[in-house]
Image: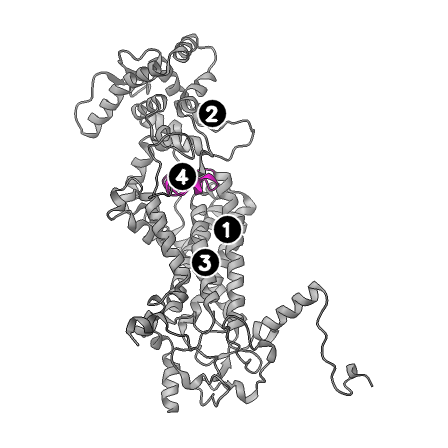
Amino acid sequence: MSLARRILTSKDETAPWRGGYARYDLVKELCIALAVITALAVLLAALFSSPDLQPSTIAAWSRQMPVNFLATASKELDGTSETAEYGPPYNKGKGFVQHAAFIHLQEWLGISHPIDPAKDYVIDPLRTVTGDPALSAALQTYERATPSRQRDWAQAYAKPLEAYEAAFAARKAPTRAVAVNERSGTVTVAASGAGPVPTMMSVLLNQARSGALDGILLTSRHFYQTDYTKPLLFIADGALLEKRAQAQHLLGNQWGMMNETGSYPGQVWLWLYTFWYQIEPFSTSHNADLLVMLVMAVLSLAFVLIPFLPVVRDIPRAIPLYRLIWREHYRSTQEDE
Amino acid sequence: MSAAHGGGAAAPRERADTWTGRLREAALAALPPEKLLPDGQPTYVASWVYVFGVASIASLTVIIGSGMILALKGPSWWHDTGVGHFFNSVHLWAVELFFFVMVVHLWAKYWMAAWRGGRARVWMTGAVTFLIAVPTALTGYVSQQNFDSQWISTQAKDAMNSVGIGAFFNLTNFGQMYSYHVLLLPAAVVTLVLAHVLLVRRHGVVPPIESKRRFAPSGGAAGGRSPRAGRSALEGGKVDPSVRGGSEGEQADPPAPRGSEGGGS
């Protein structure tokens, strides 16, 4: 019989045990294990505590990084932010839609959490402001314009902000079109052809700085709120979360999914999942998330089905680590001989 | 004197004609009390590695206990008080211990080829428990209401969305994640662990590899000297026909005196 055939047709000849038995108190063992694990968990908790970094708020973001806040809000308005271009389950965008061959799971499941970034993040919050005639006029002008005109205004406003951010990242002299007043936190943008957008954005920045925008983005038809999808995606479109994450070694290219803030152990059991993101073709693929999930699905299925997988189920026989585990048993059977 | 009082030949037991009775009979046939809670183990169950199975159950118990205390006071409590933070820390470290001991347990069982002898379902329930424990922990991380949960939820959402799961498993929806974390997924883990333990009890701890002399398939001479002075099943234990002849290649083990194999999981 060939080796391949022998492996594929190997039979399980394990027979029931008919040897000796020894006293063994399972309940006592469980009680001792419970006491030891409880003591260990309490000791580790007392010694090392647990991490709890304050969450980021839109208010904090707009105060610490007002230019980035305004640049992000402009992108929400002109439809070029990550959330605006994302696609299902948030909208009809295509920017972050993934597929593998004929598998289009993301599109098949459709839009379950609709988000219209321009409306949800800019227009609707501004509508809650009363007693500001300049804002009312700006909003009226904006809403009466054609979509392409609206987009042109938003892009004209965003352009100097993006240039400012790029210069700041490259440690070059920033553009003079953007002036940040460190004391008041206001930002003046000299953007020609931006129509009513500078007025709108100025009020939005004030709303954000006051903390009002954090509450407005959570508001829905219900009194109680538990869904943070809208504010979280808005903050994530900006640079604050990423900046904090990088400092805490949580980025994807830092094996971030299995790390924890500070020096605490995180979800280390995700090491294999995180590993795929570090190598080609996953690290550069537009469909990386889907491909990694599919690979992990196949590996997980194989893990569950190990008892039926030739070769994998036979490795323990080939590498006899079991002799270490049952060394007393094998020693006693040798003595019997 | 009636047969019920011990006189004459014992009448054959009638099968129960109610669903409840049939369930009881099936349960007792699959797991008679002395097999469910034996006070003896085969002599080969003599290694520290067996501790990691029961340590997994112990860690899960600490996780559930500390989680219940956190649940009693609500999701914001641990941010506001030192006591709350301490119980959160216990919960976190119990989770780390749980995964550590469970992974060691899984590796040990792999190298023991613990699925042998009709124990495939034992392996499979254990493996699925590990796989379900991963999203159980993930939903805990995104329910923390701190920077960690903000970052993890906004990053991990892409993977969920890419396979369409995001439609009904939205990591940025705190209310939904909290429900998954404190009820749905723990219920799945506990159910799987229960099934796993019952299967271990039923099939017993997997015997050592390739020691055929000890495993007489048709009741041949076995036993012999034991390093732990264990008693042979054939010395004093009767073979209970109710545990013989299971299905799907299941191994029916003769119960040892006052208990059968199937210990430390």
Number of residues whose C-alpha sits closer than 10 Å to that of mark 4, classed few (under 14), some (14–19) or many (20 or more) = many
Q: Distance between the residues labelled 2 and 1?
A: 32 Å
Asked whether A19 or A199 is in front, the reply is A19
The residue at which mark 4 appears reads as A106
Q: Nearer the viewer, mark 3 or mark 1?
A: 3
Q: Nearer the viewer, mark 2 or mark 3?
A: 3
Q: Is tag 3's residue or tag 1's residue first in the polypeptide sequence? A: 3
Q: How far apart are marks 4 and 1 (CA)?
A: 23 Å
Is disc 1 placed on a helix, strand or loop? helix
Q: Where is residue B196 in the image (x, y as percent from the top left)?
A: 50, 64
Q: Is residue A172 something that shows in the picture?
A: yes
Is disc 2 placed on a helix, strand or loop? helix
Q: In this view, does A159 lie to the left or right of A303?
A: left
Asked if labels 4 and 3 touch by Cβ distance under 8 angstroms, the answer is no
The residue at which mark 3 appears reads as B128
Residue drawn at 40 percent across, 55 percent down = B96
Residue drawn at 52 percent across, 57 percent down = B190
Q: Nearer the viewer, mark 2 or mark 4?
A: 4
The residue at which mark 1 appears reads as B185
Number of residues whose C-alpha sits closer than 10 Å to that of mark 1, classed few (under 14), some (14–19) or many (20 or more) = some
Q: How far apart are marks 3 and 1 (CA)?
A: 12 Å
The residue at which mark 2 appears reads as A216
Asked if labels 4 and 2 touch by Cβ distance under 8 angstroms, the answer is no
Are labels 2 and 3 assigned to the same chain?
Answer: no
* Magenta-colored span: B145-173
